[in-house]
Amino acid sequence: MTSSNQPWWLALPVDYHRRPVDTPLDRQHRFKVGASAAVDHVLKNGLAAGVLAAMANNLRKRPLAEQIGEMGFYRDLADRGDPSQVFMPPTDQVAVRISRPKKPVPGIDSRTLRFDSTFEALNPALRDRVASHGKNRIAEARHWTHPGGPRPTLVFLHGYSMDAYWINSAMFSLRWFYDQGWDVLLYTLPFHGSRRERFEPFSGFGYFSHGFAETNETMLQAIHEVRTFMRYLRELGVPSIGISGLSLGGYLSALMAAVEKDLAFAMPNAAVVSPTDMLMEWAPLREAFQRMLPKAGLDLTDIRHATAIHCPLTWQPQVPADRLLIIAGAGDRFTAPRYQQLLHEHWPGSDLHWFPGNHVMHLQQRDYLQLMRTLMRRSLSKLS
């Protein structure tokens, strides 16, 4: 996304995170939007404290100046504007190990898929460090299949620290999509669930605890592994694959729309869009950034620039606009409405659906589930 020939990280106002938050539902559902927003304000500060603890853990081990120096590699890549230099397609064959979960879903043929991740850090200086996280080197997903052969498949990416399969299945009615005839693949993000390293205090801690550069690499690792799983599904004969996800998973699903031209659809839900700006709305992180950045001689645009390689705003979508659906909560204060509107503007012609809830309470969810089903069916007819 550019303005006046500037990249988005320069064109976006520095105070964007303080701009008014409004949606078409604010008057129509005043109470629902206001109450759900108030709940989010409380919840997000708790999550922010966890993310800050993860970041602080690494700052105790490695000086900030050293970490900032590593980010120049990623700024250079963003300046080149060539996604083929950032997102390397999976080329190596992987041996997928299949096992039965201890707690299967009644009435669903459910399998756990794992493979040794073939991801290699983009930055050569980080390859040994990234490869040293043993448990995180095992990619994992839960796969729901139907009898009689492969079906069109919905890939779902969970939110930060919310990796439990049963939570995502219940919260996003994945069983309903399965009953509509879709196979489902639930991918486990790096450093979550069984991929959590020993002694990490909570699921997802490692996503932000190894330094800013490694967080960049972790984003790329997730994309690489999802693409590897998609290639595996295609080798099985799956005719069509689309993607959705919540929050951090929504961010990655939006990024996938710029990386995978063969996606049938992309439906990010409450997506993170500009992580740097979003974190400035989270009080504990904002205070830390406001103290830390001036000391390092940096401002907000520098951090945007250094993380731009994995931002959906940096790249043009490869999926046609009529197969892009952005789902957003009018009362969401984790990933506020301004960011969903920003993504919608970057994806001209995409559909943007508002619901009168927040980041975790999706009121009137049935409306967007129906929209999702319609888009999914439409994508099949266009691909046939």
Image: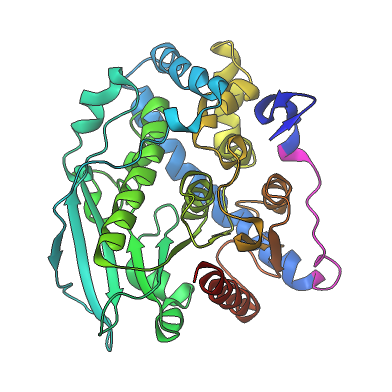
159, above or below 19, in the image:
below
The residue at 54%/76% (across/down) is 377
Residue 110 screen position, x and y as percent: 24, 76
Q: In the orientation shown, which residue stands out farthest toward the right?
A: 27
Q: Nearer the viewer, residue 287 or 376?
A: 376
Instruction: Tell me, yes or no, if residue 168 can be seen here.
Output: yes
Instruction: Tell me, yes or no, if residue 327 can be seen here.
Output: no
**Is residue 23 found inside the magenta-colored segment of the image?**
yes
Query: Is residue 31 shown left or right of residue 108?
Result: right
Q: Nearer the viewer, residue 97 or 29?
A: 97
Residue 243 screen position, x and y as percent: 47, 61
Query: Is residue 260 shown left or right of residue 91?
Result: right
**Is residue 337 found inside the magenta-colored segment of the image?**
no
Q: Nearer the viewer, residue 129 or 6?
A: 6
Q: Please provide the residue range marked out in magenta.
A: 17-30
The residue at 71%/54% (across/down) is 337
The residue at 68%/52% (across/down) is 340
Looking at the image, how many numbered discs can be counted on the residues?
A: 0
Q: Which of the 4 quarters of the picture holds residue 357?
A: bottom right
188, above or below 78, in the image:
below
Residue 316 screen position, x and y as percent: 60, 41
135, above or below 309, in the image:
below
178, above or below 167, in the image:
below
Q: In the orientation shown, which residue stands out farthest toward the bottom?
A: 107
Quarter of the rendering occupied by the N terminus:
top right
The residue at 66%/63% (across/down) is 329
Residue 143 screen position, x and y as percent: 28, 69
Q: Which of the 4 quarters of the picture holds residue 120?
A: top left
Q: Nearer the viewer, residue 308 or 224?
A: 224
Give the prevailing secondary structure in the magenta stretch: loop
